[in-house]
Image (cartoon, rainbow, N blue to C red):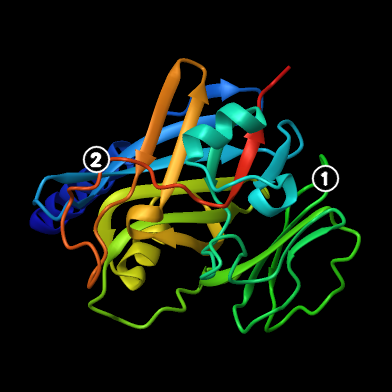
Amino acid sequence: MRRYTSLCLFSALVCAFFAQAQNISWRAIQPGVEFASLTTGKMASGDSGTLYVVRVDPARAKLTVALALESQSKPRTAAEWCRTAGLSVAINVGMYQTDLLSNVGYLRHGSHVNNPRWNADNAVLALNGSSPALWVDRDVDTRSLNNYDIVVQNLRLITKSRKNVWAPNARQWSEAALAIDSKRRLLFLFTRAPWSMREFNDELLRLPLDVAGAMHLEGGPEASLSIHGGGVDLDLAGSFETGFWPDDSNVKQWAIPNVLGVAKAK
């Protein structure tokens, strides 16, 4: 009995230690926007990796997109999009096609349609001013999204019911992703450390981020995240991608045609 009690106490202390170790310290970027970084994963070099997270409350911060086709401009880095479009945060809005301008999935901003064609991808984000973000699993929800100002379709990572939909796969890459939590706040996610998507999704669900849906935005050197506000100035670029860029050597952001961003607070 004494040994059993000791084991229970030891287990409780271990659980408490890991719970405390996983507490996230959020730093304010502007009203409704918070930033945190967590040590997780491994770089191709073997060094520890970092997951960068920007949490956005759409009721308090303005979410928008900057699209090269809409502005009749050339692709820019996320840092350049921040400067030219007045953004405090910018991340890839999704993968782009061979024309280097159009999103792979459906993408619309107001009356401007970047890509009018829906594909088989099952994750959709819809935004409308300061209203709560709408996250849709297209295989179970076919509602009309015509009344939303921003609609983007991308490859699904995690369902709204918190199911990891990726099978095990040896392919890995640096990752830019978007998630939503149970309070309908958006999570901009970025890691230079390469992950298989099955393992990345499991890690997102393990961490205390309350992830209730996630979509893939971009992988490898094109994956980007810029943060400029609240004393944080980061322009992050991905690197590793199996079969394309097999190391950590890329350190500069690539020009991308479309970003999802947070407008600077006035």
Picture quadrant where residue 114 is located: bottom right
Which quarter of the figure is the C terminus placed in?
A: top right
The residue lying at 80 percent from left, 79 percent from top is 142
Q: Where residue 118 sits in the image (x, y, percent)?
A: 70, 78
Comparing labels 1 and 2, the label whose residue is closer to the camera: 1
Residue receiving disc 1? 131
Picture quadrant where residue 23 is located: top left
108 displayed left or right of 139: right
The residue lying at 60 percent from left, 54 percent from top is 180
Residue receiving disc 2? 17
Q: For the residue marked with disc 2, what is the amino acid? A: Phe
Relative height, residue 93 to residue 31 (above, below):
below
Mark sitting on residue 199: none
Relative height, residue 83 to residue 110 (above, below):
above
Which quarter of the figure is the N terminus placed in?
A: bottom left
1 displayed left or right of 100: left
Q: Residues within 10 Å of mark 2 (few under 14, many from 20)?
A: few
